[in-house]
Image (cartoon, grey):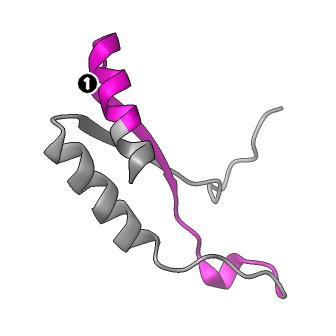
Amino acid sequence: MNDLWSFSSMSKRLGLYTVRLPVGLIREHLAQEGKSFPRGGIQYLGRLIGWCTDTKIYVIIDFHSDHSPEPAIH
């Protein structure tokens, strides 16, 4: 929680009022066997949005997915 308030005061000092939050969705049926992924992300996302709302910081939720039919170009 202290980190949040440090970020909040720093962002206000710098004039920042928006946070971009990249979010990836994991489709369990596409995940490799033997790998585990953290649970509870939705609850943490809700807490983060609540903190930002309380400190008058906008949140842009940027959904990412690499499960498109087209291959990535590197």
Q: Nearer the viewer, residue 70 or 62?
A: 62
Residue at horizontal 75%, vertical 47%?
A: 71
Task: Tell me if residue 11 comes above or below residue 3 in the rendering.
Answer: above
Measured from the top left, where is residue 47 in percent x and y?
30, 62
Disc 1: which residue: 17
Residue at horizontal 40%, vertical 33%?
A: 7
User: Where, quadrant-wise, is the C terminus in this rendering?
Assistant: top right
Q: Nearer the viewer, residue 65 or 69?
A: 65
Measured from the top left, where is residue 61 in percent x and y?
36, 46
User: Residue 4 appears in which quarter of the rendering?
Assistant: top left
Magenta-tinted stretch = 6-33
Element at badge 1? Answer: loop
Residue at horizontal 25%, vertical 51%?
A: 51
Task: Tell me if residue 37 comes above or below residue 50 in the rendering.
Answer: below
Q: Nearer the viewer, residue 46 or 29?
A: 46
Task: Tell me if residue 31 comes above or below residue 3 in the rendering.
Answer: below
Q: Is residue 53 magenta?
A: no
Task: Tell me if residue 30 comes above or below residue 33 in the rendering.
Answer: above
Report the number of discs: 1
Q: Nearer the viewer, residue 28 or 11?
A: 11
Q: Is residue 13 magenta?
A: yes
Measured from the top left, where is residue 68 in percent x and y?
62, 55
Horizontally, residue 55 falls left or right of residue 40, namely left
User: Residue 3 appears in which quarter of the rendering?
Assistant: top left
